[in-house]
């Protein structure tokens, strides 16, 4: 996401001195912007002690980007990593004649793009700074700059002996122009920082409690607020009695906040009433004392049962054909055998460790926001929309995020905080409780999948039909026509496209008032469960080994066109490699005792590849034990192997937790789950000691890592359950289905 500014290479970076004598490298603003201001957005500071400070422009949500991107700058700068520190940069946007553009380069993470969209950009930042230091050293020694080389914070003379610290070149370098042409980047094979194992840059602060998350925000004069939100989907406030709430000691004000009308795009999730107080506890007590009459809204009769019935009814009709290769109906009629299976996935919540929160202070036509977010530019846009304040006057500061998973792509909580501050005139931190978070979310869409396949006499798949009735993620998204509602639910080029000649996908939009949004790996987390389960079922239906069956279906390694996010190509050979690897590591194919089985699954997600082998045992009473997990990811080139490994481990646990127990249900137009007693995340005991995670590099091009390892987890688990018991799990979560069947 490079800045969309027309500029020459000379203007790519500028350098200068601070009052303390440090050397700064940064990106200049376009001449048309900010009334001709020469203000600079800095990435690199070189101090007099030769230490280096690198700015991180992306939100850190636990994916390791605050370490990974500075590693790329340090690599090309040839800085000594032990002397590098990292600071979080705020949102940087500037106004030009063409509109707003980036000050520090594009800022926002989601879809595992934080690294891939900055891979070249950050390297060029470091390489340009290195080039200037080489020029300065060449002038100092009277030699050609290109004959000098940089290494570990020093410029080395062509004789190989003399060297100058970067700090010794600060003044001279600050006077030099930047290179006209794009700098030469280092070959990946020569990397000494990237591709190496480094701990998270602020790990000491994290483990000692010094790291500041959104909930740690403290501003002089700050007040605290909580909101009572309408418990009914799209309901509204009919009456309010706040007399008792205002009598609670510490309560300062009570502010109604109307929500969007039914069907309108969301800016906040629900109508509500904010209670502002001197402390969070006083605000919660005040909220509990409110007497509110809510209208039940247009979805008062909605329930999980009615949703499921609607899906079943729709699948009995004809839907929208959204992908159609070959002639599926003819191929099914000519098939030696056909097979059908139906799968059901529920709504699920993000449930981040840190519930939503935001500090906002609206004052004198300006607004300061401190917020944990994946999309700071979205905060700026939405706060401007709800307050009427120009984006130039909205300051957005990012904290480390205590769990993103797609929830913090939406910034409704920032809009709420800004509205509460504007209405009260106070600096306010809006705090959500766990109950607020679970009952007011943009949930992962629920749906019913029906898969039908035809096989020839040799057990090869000749026809494939995938029919989906679901509540689209695009619900209430502005300017999305009804015929595009399928697009975030069924990815056009997903496997087995290109491997089955006759393939059709059919979509049915389901009506529901439940808010929907991006949930880690969006549709991949659902579709991998469905497709990988179905492949396992087809193998057993045709009397074939599931591993051999899938390897034959994947076919040879080749680059297949992939038009969706994660393209431009998909290589099934990379999945085969991972699948064979995890199967071998898990001992797939060996004789196992009764009640024990190994399941396999793999998936391509947003440019990366992952596979899992999971071994389980199931007692006669239906007690499930996960005995062993082998996980592997191919993310191309692992810039930050520690972060990549952490994502494989964390995503696997997240996938297990969701597959085992998690679902959001609706009754009488209300979300039923309120806290972890009704939404039980996986415990330590659910994860086996025998848990292997592997990174298998492929080439010198990185992919993202945050979402890639999650999708294969659920099908590997349920395929293992079938191998152990002969019982198919076609409805998630697994929960007590095994115990029910044992009884």
Image (cartoon, grey):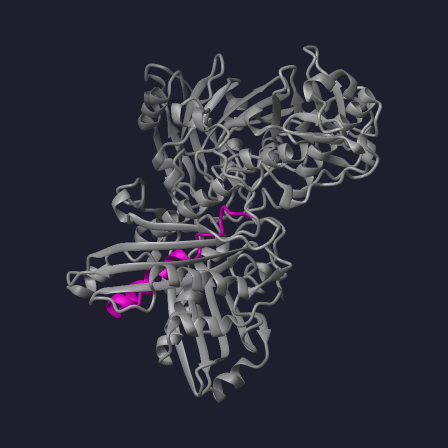
State whether residue 42 appears in this view: no
The residue under the point 57% across, 29% down is 81
State whether residue 531 appears in this view: yes
- Judging depth in this view, the residue of 201 and 266 nearest the camera is 201
The residue range painted magenta reads: 704-730
Q: Is residue 293 above or below residue 664?
A: above
- Judging depth in this view, the residue of 48 and 428 nearest the camera is 48
Q: Is residue 500 above or below residue 229?
A: below
> Quadrant where the N terminus lies?
top right
Total tally of numbered discs in the picture: 0
Q: Is residue 322 above or below residue 268?
A: below
Left or right relative to 288: residue 474: right
Provide residue 727's location: percent of width, then percent of height: 27, 68
Please tell me whether residue 716 belongs to the stretch shown in magenta: yes
Please tell me whether residue 88 belongs to the stretch shown in magenta: no
Q: Furthest-top residue in view?
A: 19
Provide residue 288's location: percent of width, then percent of height: 31, 28
Left or right relative to 288: residue 237: right
Q: Quadrant of residue 184?
A: top right
> Quadrant where the C terminus lies?
bottom left
Provide residue 296's location: percent of width, then percent of height: 38, 45
The residue under the point 38% across, 78% down is 544
- Judging depth in this view, the residue of 577 and 364 nearest the camera is 577
Q: Is residue 398 above or below residue 169?
A: below
Provide residue 188's location: percent of width, then percent of height: 64, 45
Left or right relative to 688: residue 700: right
Q: Quadrant of residue 56?
A: top right
């Amino acid at each position: 996401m490079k800045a969309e500014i027309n500029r020459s290479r000379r203007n790519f970076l500028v350098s200068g001195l601070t009052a303390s004598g440090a050397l700064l490298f940064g990106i200049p603003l376009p001449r048309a912007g900010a009334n001709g201001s020469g203000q600079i957005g800095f990435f690199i500071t070189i101090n007099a002690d030769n230490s280096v400070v690198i700015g991180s422009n992306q939100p850190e949500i636990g994916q390791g980007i605050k370490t990974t991107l500075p590693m790329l700058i340090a690599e090309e700068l040839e800085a000594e990593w032990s002397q590098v520190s990292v600071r979080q940069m705020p949102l940087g946007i500037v106004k030009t004649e063409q509109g707003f553009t980036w000050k520090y380069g594009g800022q926002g993470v989601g879809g595992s793009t934080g690294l891939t969209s900055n891979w070249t950009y950050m390297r060029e930042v470091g390489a340009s700074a290195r080039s200037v230091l080489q020029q300065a050293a060449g002038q100092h020694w009277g030699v050609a700059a290109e004959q000098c080389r940089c290494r570990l914070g020093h410029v080395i003379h062509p004789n190989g002996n003399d060297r100058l610290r970067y700090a010794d070149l600060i003044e001279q370098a600050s006077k030099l122009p930047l290179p006209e042409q794009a700098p030469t980047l280092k070959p990946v094979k020569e990397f000494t920082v990237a591709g190496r194992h480094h701990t998270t840059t602020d790990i000491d602060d994290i483990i000692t409690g010094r790291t500041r998350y959104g909930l740690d925000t403290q501003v002089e004069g700050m007040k605290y607020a909580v909101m009572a939100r309408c418990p009914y989907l799209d309901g509204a406030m009919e009456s309010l009695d706040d007399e008792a709430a205002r009598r609670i000691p510490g309560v300062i004000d009570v502010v109604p906040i109307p929500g969007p009308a039914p069907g309108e795009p969301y800016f906040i999730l629900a109508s509500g009433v904010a209670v502002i107080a001197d402390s969070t506890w006083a605000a919660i007590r005040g909220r509990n004392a409110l007497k509110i009459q809510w209208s039940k809204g247009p979805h008062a009769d909605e329930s999980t049962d009615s949703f499921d019935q609607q899906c079943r009814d729709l699948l009995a009709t004809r839907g929208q054909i959204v992908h159609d290769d070959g002639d599926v109906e003819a191929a099914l009629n000519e098939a030696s055998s056909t097979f059908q299976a139906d799968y059901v996935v529920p709504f699920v919540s993000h449930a981040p460790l840190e519930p939503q929160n935001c500090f906002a202070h609206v004052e004198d036509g300006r607004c300061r926001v401190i917020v944990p977010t994946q999309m700071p530019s979205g905060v700026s846009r939405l706060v401007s929309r709800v307050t009427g304040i120009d984006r130039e006057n909205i300051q957005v500061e990012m904290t480390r995020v205590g769990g993103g998973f797609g929830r913090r792509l939406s910034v409704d909580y920032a809009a709420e905080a800004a509205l509460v501050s504007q209405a009260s005139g106070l600096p306010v931190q809006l705090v959500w409780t766990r109950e607020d978070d679970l009952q007011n979310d943009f949930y992962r869409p629920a749906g019913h999948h029906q898969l039908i396949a035809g096989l020839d006499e040799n057990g090869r798949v000749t026809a494939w039909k995938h029919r989906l009735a679901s509540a689209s993620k695009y619900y209430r998204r502005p300017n999305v026509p009804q015929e595009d509602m399928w697009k975030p639910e069924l990815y056009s080029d997903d496997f087995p496209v290109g491997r089955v000649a006759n393939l059709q996908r059919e979509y049915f939009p389901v009506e529901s008032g439940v808010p929907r949004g991006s949930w880690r790996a969006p549709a991949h987390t659902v579709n991998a469960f469905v497709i990988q389960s179905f492949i396992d079922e087809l193998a057993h239906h045709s009397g074939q080994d599931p591993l051999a069956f899938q390897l034959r279906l994947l076919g040879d390694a080749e680059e297949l066109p992939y038009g969706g996010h994660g393209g431009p190509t998909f290589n099934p050979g990379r999945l085969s490699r991972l699948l064979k690897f995890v199967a071998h590591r898990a001992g797939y194919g060996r004789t196992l005792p009764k009640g024990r089985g190994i399941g396999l699954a793999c998936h391509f997600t947003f440019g990366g590849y992952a596979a899992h082998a999971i071994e389980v045992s199931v007692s006669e009473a239906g007690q499930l034990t996960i005995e062993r997990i082998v996980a592997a990811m191919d993310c191309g080139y692992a810039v930050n192997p520690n972060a990549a490994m952490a994502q494989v481990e964390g995503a696997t646990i997240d996938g297990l937790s969701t597959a085992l127990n998690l679902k959001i249900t609706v009754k009488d137009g209300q979300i039923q789950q309120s806290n972890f007693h009704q939404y039980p995340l996986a415990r330590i005991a659910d994860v086996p000691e025998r848990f292997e995670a592997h990174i298998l590099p492929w080439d010198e091009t990185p992919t993202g890592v945050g979402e890639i390892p999650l999708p294969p987890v659920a099908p590997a688990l349920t395929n293992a359950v079938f191998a152990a018991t002969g019982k198919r799990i076609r409805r998630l979560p697994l929960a007590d289905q095994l115990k029910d069947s044992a009884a």
